[in-house]
Structure formats: structure tokens, C-alpha cells
Amino acid sequence: MTAPEIIVQGQATIGAAQLFAPLSLSLAAGKWTCLLGGSGVGKSTVLRLIAGLQTGAVFDGSITASDGGEVVPRVAYMAQDDLLLPWATVTQNITLGARLRGERPDQERLQRLLGRVRLTEHASKKPAELSGGQRQRVALARTLMEDKPVILLDEPFSALDAQTRADMQDLAVELLAGRTVLLVTHDPGEAARLGHSIVVMEQSGLTHCPPPTADVPRKVDGLDTLAAQAALLRMLRGEAA
Ligand SMILES: Nc1ncnc2c1ncn2[C@@H]1O[C@H](COP(=O)(O)OP(=O)(O)OP(=O)(O)O)[C@@H](O)[C@H]1O
């Protein structure tokens, strides 16, 4: 599978108000781009636009792939809300994509994924019987189950405890190697760990922040990771980097 670069160019308005000014966001092929920014600045909107989903905004611009192919059919999207079907089991939720397409889910892949996200013993449960962190891991597994070259993740680790969060970050990096990934996160530490490219979004535009040089996933307590995390936090708080 060859993952393309994705290029988002344009501006968005909601009613008469500008949501974000003209921006140009390039998601490097086969790399992780981490997108941070204040609440309501339009990060989820950008993700939903790339996924071809409805938003509350009017977008004036283009979303293209470097190879000229269609973008939307090649995207797997994990929303901020887990969007699990309440009447379906964990297994049925994870295999939803295949079942919607009328395909037989890959059982071996399913069992492997269930084990990796530590949900094997919960496979027959319904979402209401799960904790918030377990539900988020179901949604993550559902996204990883889709074998797509472009992956959009909207705060996918936000409900996880610190240990599980680091483990799931490692898992995502491993399983999504070579994919073009856009990760929206509020966590500067997560961006410093995972981003080949780190971008802060404001209404006025994008600021690119230099990532640490080590390959991802970087050490949680690596000096470069911690320095990048601190610089990002300062930037998000409006202080000089
Ligand atoms: N369906 C909708 N209809 C109208 N406005 C919407 C809709 N969805 C989002 N918005 C508005 O669009 C703006 C951007 O929302 P978006 O969810 O993209 O922000 P965000 O940067 O992802 O925020 P957060 O970090 O809080 O998730 C917000 O002001 C929000 O109120």
C-alpha cells in the first residue's frame, strides 16, 4: 500500500464569521502530522473535511492527494466521540466497516487486534458495559481494522490512563507504519512523542513547530521530547517559544 501526501488548502466560514483564514496544510506521505490548537479553532473540522464528512462550516478550497487519486475512499477516521453502535458487541463494532461493505471480516486480524488493545475478554460485551477508556480502545481498534493508507485520529488517546496511553501510542505507530496520519491532540507531550511534523492551528493560520530529531515513537521522558513538549506548551499559552 502506498500512502499519498494529502494537501489541504483553503479557508472556512461559519455563517458570516471566519472559522479559519486561508491555510495550507500538507500531510507528508507515510508520516505522522500532529495538529494542536485551542478549543473551537477548527481542528476537528479539518479532519472531517478531509474525511468528506459534513461540518458546520463552509469550506472554500481544495483537498487533494499527491498522486492525483481520490482522497475520501482511502481514509479511515476516528472521531472524538467513539460513535460505537450501542446495540452491537465489541467485535461487531470493530468489524463494522467490513460488515457494511458486505465483506467477511478478517478473523485473524480481528483476534490479533483485540489482543493488542487488551479487549479479548470483553469481545462479547456491549459498549454500555465498558469503561470510557475501553470504549475508546474499541474505536481505535475499529480504525486500525480498516486497512487504509490515510488515517485521521481525533484525540484518540484522550480517555486512557497514562500507562495505557503510552502503550496505545506505541501500538498505533507500529500498526500505522507507512500510513499518512493526521492526529488531533490537546496534549503537547503526545505531539512531541508522535509527530514527524507538529503544527499549531490558530484562527489566523498555522505555525509549524520543529519536532525532536529522534524517530517516533519517542521516549516519553527523552530530553528532546520534554523540551519540545515544553516549547509547545509555551506556544499554546501564547508565550514566546
Ligand atoms: N455542526 C456544526 N454546526 C455549526 N457549527 C459547528 C458545528 N460543528 C462545529 N461547529 C463550530 O465550529 C467551530 C470549530 O469546531 P471544531 O470542532 O472543528 O473545533 P476544534 O478545534 O476541533 O475544537 P476542540 O478542540 O474543542 O475539539 C466551533 O466554533 C464549533 O462551535
Image: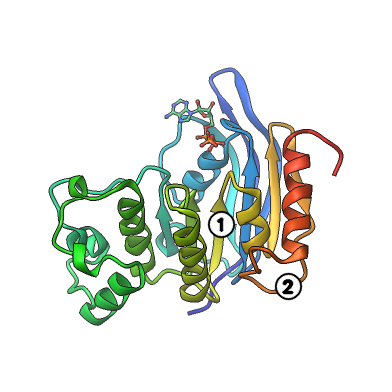
Q: Residue at x 25, y 76 (%)?
A: 111
Is the CB of the residue bearing disc 1 within 8 angstroms of ligand 1? no
Residue 153 % position (x, y): 48, 54
Residue 193 as seen in the image, left or right of residue 86: right
Residue 207 % position (x, y): 77, 45
Gap between marks 1 and 2 measured at Cα: 19 Å
Sequence-wise first label, 1 or 2: 1
**Front of the two marks 1 and 2:** 2
Which circle marks residue 100 in the picture?
none
Most foreground residue, 12 or 107? 107
Residue at the disc numbered 1: 182
The colouring scheme, among rainbow, by chain, secondary structure or one colour, is: rainbow
Residue type at mark 1: give it. Leu
Most foreground residue, 196 or 164? 164
Residue 163 as seen in the image, left or right of residue 230: left
Residue type at mark 2: give it. Ala
Most foreground residue, 42 or 185? 185
Which circle marks residue 214 in the picture?
2
Residue 113 % position (x, y): 32, 73
The secondary element bearing badge 1 is classed as: strand
Residue 74 as seen in the image, left or right of residue 12: left
- Mark 1, residues whose alpha carbon is within 10 Å: few (<14), some, or many (≥20)? many
Figure label count = 2
Can residue 70 be seen by looking at this rendering?
A: no
Q: Are marks 1 and 2 in contact (CB under 8 Å)?
A: no
The secondary element bearing badge 2 is classed as: loop
Residue 163 % position (x, y): 48, 61
Q: Residue at x 47, y 48 (%)?
A: 158
